Image: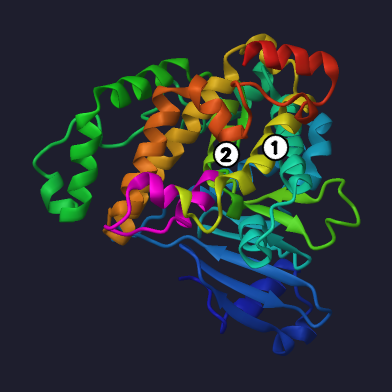
Amino acid sequence: MQLSSINLPNYLIRLGLCPPENQNQLIIKPVAAKNFNLLVTLPDGKKLLVKQERYNQDGKTAGEFGQEWRIQEFVQHFRELTTLHPYLPQVLHFDPGESIIIFRYLDEYRDVMEFYAEETIFPSAIAASIGTTLAAIHRATFNRDDYRHFFSQHSHSLPETVPNLISGLERITPEIFGLVPVDGLKFFALYQRYDSLGNAIAQLGKTFTPSCLTHNDLKLNNILLSNHWEQSRDRIVRLIDWERSRWGDPAFDVGTLIASYIQIWLDSLVISNALSLEESLRLATTPLDQLQPSIASLTQAYFHNFPEILTHRPTLLLQIIQFAGLALIQQIQATIQYQKSFGNSGIAMLQVAKTLLCRPQQSIPTIFGTEGGKFNASLLAGERFGERFSRFC
């Protein structure tokens, strides 16, 4: 790494982020993450987060910070987008040559997943604020050729063709036996057993419609919640870690968010060889019905603040549900890759993912906690929208 606790003070002084007389008063602590991060506390109490990308064996980085900085350039370039600033992280410096980026650390925030884990409550107001924020970003950038052109200047920012939604599953080769543990091979065997699953993913890829700025990695731990959210519910969340952002499909972002809520439920399952899958689902320590109001509030707020999206994409809700299933499969792949495991919890997640992908219409009551495949009218914002949405469901 280029920076450490030893040379970081001088680096910050050169950037004008730290007065020279304070260099011996800085408190510098490492922060556990996939990158090499340092948290700096200045004498006045303000904090900076210094992130450095790790180098691979060839001495190169993935270049993900460039995309994070690209979002800042995007909002600065188009003045009408300054309203999005309160939803984004505050970037103070970016060094593309050394892959270093510095943020103002938001000490008065914590990530939403941490809030849910510590408080064990799921207020619908928080989910609604997330849906409202995401709708504001999607709506502000929707179907603008000038915005699309801005991102197309960097080919990695714009998928020219249908993206490869599931890496490595289209064609299993013998090399997989040297890369995946024995438990992980069960996943590939189960995946290939269901032709309908592969067909559903292929069909979903054909419907992928890049039309606005998307975060593309919108999990609950990439959303910050204000510590004072109960006192002021206006703009109480920020979206961070835009390293994978691109000109993409809005359904992907919303689906990934819903999957993040579903995963809270699946991670709380009581797993035992003595229990059937149905019994494990029923005995979850965080039952799905505790999360359904948040999922419904998030979706309601999104469509309420971006109603015209349904004119362009009348089947968007079904695609959102399918993308939620896809996100669960991607999580299974990540667990196999990094934790080298695929057990009963993974099998349960795969079963849920398969249902969402192959039967999105029938999944609506399960995901949103409604009867008859319709949203409860009280969950919908406005009679006109409620009638339209209920007819669609």
Which sits earlier in the primary sequence, circle 2 or circle 1?
Answer: 2
- In the rendered view, tell whether residue 235 sits above or below residue 119: above
- In the rendered view, tell whether residue 327 sits above or below residue 121: above
Q: Amino acid at mark 1?
A: Leu
Q: Is residue 67 left or right of residue 45?
A: left
For mark 1, does the 10 Å Cα neighbourhood hold few (<14), some (14 to 19), or many (20 or more) residues?
many
Work out how far the residue at label 2 is from the one at label 1, CA to CA, in angstroms.
8 Å
Task: Answer with the quarter of the image where residue 109 lies.
Answer: bottom right
Q: Residue at x 57, y 14 (%)?
A: 315
- Which region is colored magenta? 262-281
Q: Quadrant of the C terminus?
A: top right
- Residue 142 location, x and y as percent? 69, 21
Task: Answer with the quarter of the image where residue 378 lies.
Answer: top right
For mark 2, does the 10 Å Cα neighbourhood hold few (<14), some (14 to 19), or many (20 or more) residues?
many
In contact (CB < 8 Å): disc 2 and disc 1: yes
- In the rendered view, tell whether residue 321 sits above or below residue 244: above
Residue 267 forms part of the magenta stretch: yes
The residue where tag 2 is placed is 258
The residue where tag 1 is placed is 298
Q: What colour scheme does the image use?
A: rainbow
Q: Is residue 256 left or right of residue 279?
A: right
Q: Is residue 161 visible?
A: no
Residue 304 forms part of the magenta stretch: no
Q: Disc 1 on helix, strand or loop?
A: helix
Q: Disc 2 on helix, strand or loop?
A: helix
- Residue 365 location, x and y as percent? 57, 28
Q: Residue at x 60, y 44 (%)?
A: 289
Q: Residue at x 51, y 55 (%)?
A: 97
Q: Amino acid at mark 2?
A: Ile
